[in-house]
Image: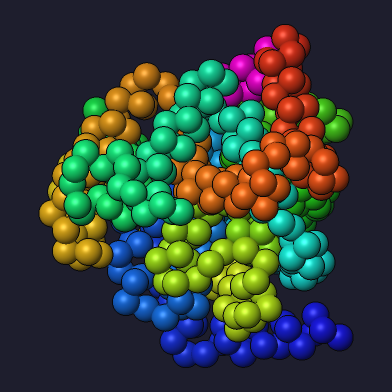
Amino acid sequence: MDLVSNLALGFTTAASPANLAFCLIGVLLGTLIGVLPGIGATATIAMLLPITFQLEPVSSLIMLAGIYYGAQYGGSTTAILINMPGESSSAVTAIDGYQMARKGRAGAALSIAALGSFFAGSVSTFLVAIFAIPLTGIALKFGAAEYFSLMVVGLVSSIALAHGSIVKALAMVALGLLLGLVGTDIYTGTPRFNLGIREYSDGLNFVAVAVGVFGIAEILRNLEGEKTRSLVMAKVSGLWPTRDDFRRMVGPVLRGTAIGSALGILPGGGAILAAFASYTVEKRVSDHPEEFGQGAVAGVAGPESANNAGAQTSFIPLLTLGIPANPVMALMVGAMIIQGIVPGPNVATEQPTLFWGIIASMWIGNLMLVVLNLPLIGLWVKLLTVPYYVLFPIIMAFCSIGVYSVNSNVYDLYAVALFGLGGYLLVKLRCEPAPLLLGFVLGPLLEENLRRAMILSRGDPTTFFTRPISAILLAVALAVLIVVFLPSVKKKREEVFQEED
């Protein structure tokens, strides 16, 4: 009964005219940036963070969430029409979706992707609602030692699921943790690592770091590798799938939803990993595996369902534990903190309107996406013809104005430029910046809980191993590290990410 009353509260909040408007803006903007290759949800949300400071907390988070799962929808459009995934998680969709388009079935492929995503998004949002309160109740029993160990698990998992070298991912986490130390000591009030610049006494501006590492760096990378886009067709027709298409997509959609819902909770890249896992599963269970790569319906329906389900369930650790499962969730944590909200289990009890309003808005947003996306395909097709050199100056100006408007601090612009160049260098060195952002966000929380646990135990480090939950979490983190470094697992991991690239 509590679930029903909580959902009623959530829908009442999400269905208010203002929140409906911001949800619509979020999903449309998310679809737009998903359609335009090379921008991405992470960079866009980082750029839009300054705008959300002027909004109510519920409205801003509903809009940011809409951008995230809207981008999962939009990414499939470019993957199918021009064989260029708008989102990393849509890379698998391009394999069979583009082949369907070449055979004159682009409309059916787009519909299959949209319908599969809608079903997966609806089911996974229901799972978020079901598991939210039980997990919140467990999290309320956590002390400082348990939170420290939980964050260690999150950081280790992000290393394991990061692209490329494990050592590089570990280095990125360490760099993020170091950047998080800049500012003032939380207990003594002593300035540290701020190079004598008073403006950095409160630490590096989260928005400046995020916009630089993801936004500016992504612009530089796209300018370097801009390609001429060639559409398969200027007009898409035959949008509704055939009866045979529906028969072929039922199993893959169900399996993809299950895979995505489970993997989306994992820190790192749940939606991306889910899409590849779903494609692998569908190819193995298919009676005709030779069809994959030639326009198989299951090759579109499964991965699209999986990546959307993974995007939705990544909100579970954010809303219940305050732990981000991926870079976008890290940005959501930053948005909550800047709005004066402390992420964690107390949000559900202290701000139920916010908590359940976000969950309810996911259903509304998914419905908006499936209703709006298919009629607007003609508009998205036209947008694909806009050259990137026209877009990037506007994006750069928008980034700079947005970052400066947060604190009216010119040093934040220097930070954006520095981290933009640094982020571009990381890309060239094949170092994924996602673990860096997770380390930067979790660093201060990790330090605070570490020191609090040590103070409560009077300097006894065994407190992390004598408390059962903390000990189990640390054992899980150690097990993940050991498994990732096993030769067979390491080889398979390299093969998966090589396929993705």
Q: Quadrant of residue 319?
A: bottom right
- The spot of residue 432 in percent (x, y) is 45, 30
Q: Nearer the viewer, residue 494 or 453?
A: 453
Display coloring? rainbow
Range covered by the magenta-colored residues: 491-500
Asked if residue 205 shows in the view, the reply is no
Q: Nearer the viewer, residue 348 or 110?
A: 348
Q: Nearer the viewer, residue 304 or 25?
A: 25
- Most extreme residue toward the front, as rendered? 458
- The spot of residue 206 in percent (x, y) is 36, 52
- The spot of residue 207 in percent (x, y) is 33, 54
Q: Is residue 97 above or below residue 41?
A: above
Image point (85%, 45%), residue name:
468
Residue 234 is covered by the magenta coloring: no
Q: Quadrant of residue 123?
A: bottom right
Q: Quadrant of residue 359?
A: bottom right
The number of callouts visible is 0
Image point (41%, 43%), residue name:
180
Quadrant occupied by the N terminus: bottom right
Residue 497 is covered by the magenta coloring: yes
Name the main secondary structure of what is drawn in magenta: helix
Q: Is residue 417 left or right of residue 322?
A: left
- The spot of residue 328 in percent (x, y) is 49, 51
Q: Is residue 304 above or below residue 277?
A: below
